[in-house]
Amino acid sequence: VAEGLGHVDKLHLEWNEFQGSDGVDFALEIMQSQTKMTQFCYVRNPVYNGQDCQILIDSIVSHPNISSCQLECVCGRERNGHDYLVDLLRKEEMKSVDFSNCGLTTNSQSTLFEAIKFHPNLAWLNLWENNLN
């Protein structure tokens, strides 16, 4: 991990055309070197590999200061983002999440509803264009 990159409070990686795992690897390197970062945006960069998607979510959850993230279309619509969102909402410090257009389906699962209902700090959650049924 590179050191001495300065201080990045907000990282926005919107609409890039990353190939394979390149985007996730790049995002992880920045997150690991920028411990003061509070906002992370990875909009319209579909992650088609389930392992990479889980690595990205785990990195956000384990980051000491990220409390806001925009992950629109992160799951590539081919994957059900339900478990990824539930994992993300396990981070009590999370205040703002955009998880729109992520192929999220609930199939009457209450896990997501419980995670939202009992989250202590969540102030904004965008679930636009998912299949909540």
Image: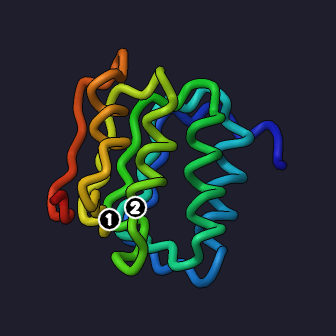
**N-terminal-most mark, 1 or 2:** 2
Task: Using the numbered discs, state the Cα–Cα distance from disc 1 to disc 2 in whole angstroms.
Answer: 6 Å
Proximity of marks 1 and 2: CB atoms separated by less than 8 Å: yes
Q: Nearer the viewer, residue 85 or 74?
A: 85
Q: Can you tell which quarter of the image residue 125 is in?
A: top left
Residue 77, position in %: x, y?
Answer: 34, 76
Q: What count of labels does the image hold? A: 2
Amino acid type, callout 2: Gly
Establish if 10 lies above or below 79: above
At 65% from the left edge and 68% from the top edge, which residue is drawn? 51
Mark 1 residue type: Cys
| Residue drawn where x is 42% and y is 74% of the image | 79
Please rate how many residues cluster around mark 2, counting C-alpha atoms within 10 Å: few if below 14, some from 14 to 19, many from 20: many
* Residue 69 location, quadrant: top left
**Residue in the picture at 43% in, 35% down:** 89
Instruction: Point out residue 87 in the picture as x, y percentages from the top left corner.
Output: 51, 43
Query: Dot 1 corresponds to which residue?
Result: 102
Q: Which mark is residue 81?
A: 2
Element at label 1: loop
In the structure shown, which secondary structural element does the residue marked by tag 2 occupy? loop
Q: Quadrant of the C terminus?
A: bottom left
- Given residues 112 and 30, the one toward you in this image is 112
With respect to residue 81, does 15 lie above or below? below
Instruction: Specify the color scheme.
Output: rainbow
Residue drawn at 33 percent across, 21 percent down: 118
